[in-house]
Amino acid sequence: MKRMCLCIFVLACFAVALCQGPRRDRGEGMYQLESSNTMGPGNTWATARGIGFLWASSPDSAKRPGIFPFLELESETGLLDFASVKVASRVLSYPWSHWWQFGNISAAAKFTLPDNKQLRFRGYGLELKYTYNALSKFASLGGYRVDGTGFNAEGYTTQGSVFQFKAIHDIDFISQYSWLPLKMGVDAGMRIPLTKTPNSSWNYIQPQFLFDAGISYVQLTYDVFAEYSLEAFNNFLGPKKITGLDSLHTRVMEVWFLENPMYVTIGGRIRYNNGMELCLCVPFLVSQNVGSAMTEADNTLFNRGGFPDEHARGINSPFDPWFAQWKVVAQLTFPLIYKQTGSEMMRNFLLLKGASKEKKFDIDDELKKNGAAGDTVDTSEKEKKARLDEINKRREQMEKSE
């Protein structure tokens, strides 16, 4: 009888521990880096995201920078244990003629192996995404823009339909080492414009290679993470020549690998028991200029015959990565429909288990410091004796009644 009561007590404590902790999104990644996991089946999460930065509207440091705040909305739903779908939109994008423009709308599907019902050490996934960019006008880098295609503060944008895919791989250390709540991941893929240039001699509509890598320290109520993101042209072995990227279609420029949009992002997330998450991160530009730059000094030198190697390759316009030096990204995520998944239930349990051990150790240290350990032992013994007396009293009453 005593053993049965003990087992019931242990199981009840275990169940209570599992029910504690915040609601978690099984498929959440970092900022650009995607997670290989998909959202729990039937679960739906909504996200509102604000992005802001300061940027000069032309590559001239003497010009006064403008403030660019954007608003993005996103919703993701789990379909099966190994699939989820996402709909997202930048509803407010670059202003033009004092009016904010609608940016884009996208739909994506993510798939993973059907072993993500529980925590797994290695995860593999695939994301397929379609985006329609409606943005038609924006301040560009040195005038490198044809309608809504060209270089803006965030990198290279293609107007119209774009298809994108990413292969995803990540490692979740807590599944093997309960004391190590770290996640690491990489994803790689391509962004392919479905629109073609109207003239075969112009090649300003270009595909891009995508790569992200990151590491995250995941705790019960907060995360901190760092990631690297790259959007590269086919310029790994040499510069990519782009022609016709201006209203007269006469410019010839080139982009080196170091001039691709590259950011290192530092961020964190606070998680509440009801599932609401607040995330703040700051991407920092790490791209570097190669060759002539889009400055008044280099433009003057270039037009006077400077940079002869570029002239020899047929380049007639300088280029440099005059992207936003930093951005601030703040987002609010909350569950609309939620059912806890087994993997995140186990993650909460392991994190709670680790936190309780740490807390107990700290309390004991404090008691020892204050010299109160003996009093605690005495009090504990008195409570045990009182409970035992109560149990014996009830047992005697039951025997008499029988």
Image (cartoon, rainbow, N blue to C red):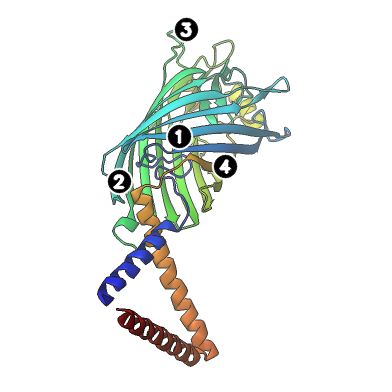
Q: CA distance from mark 3 to mark 4?
A: 39 Å
Disc 2, SS: loop
Q: Is residue 206 visible?
A: no
In the picture of the structure, the residue carrying the numbered disc 1 is: 76
Q: Which residue is at a point 73% across and 23% down the rendered structure image?
A: 98
In the picture of the structure, the residue carrying the numbered disc 3 is: 198
Q: CA distance from mark 4 to mark 2?
A: 27 Å
Q: Amino acid at mark 2?
A: Lys
Of callouts 2 and 1, the N-terminal one: 1
Q: CA distance from mark 3 to mark 2?
A: 49 Å
In the picture of the structure, the residue carrying the numbered disc 4 is: 331
- Residue 105 percent location from the top left of the image: 51, 24
Q: Amino acid at mark 4?
A: Gln
Q: CA distance from mark 1 to mark 4?
A: 15 Å
- Residue 346 percent location from the top left of the image: 35, 55
Q: Is residue 156 visible?
A: yes
In the picture of the structure, the residue carrying the numbered disc 2 is: 117
Q: Amino acid at mark 1?
A: Glu
Question: Could you tell whether 25 is left or right of 7 in the image?
Answer: right
Q: CA distance from mark 1 to mark 3?
A: 36 Å
Question: Could you tell whether 358 is left or right of 14 in the image?
Answer: right
User: Badge 1 local density, few (<14 within 10 Å), some, or many (20+)?
Assistant: many
Viewport quadrant of the N terminus:
bottom left
Quadrant of residue 83 within the rendered picture? top left
Disc 4, SS: strand
In the rendered view, tell whether residue 105 sits above or below residue 377: above
Q: Which residue is at a point 55% across and 44% down the rendered structure image?
A: 284
* Foreground of the two, 30 or 282: 30
Question: Could you tell whether 244 is left or right of 35 in the image?
Answer: right
Of callouts 3 and 4, the N-terminal one: 3
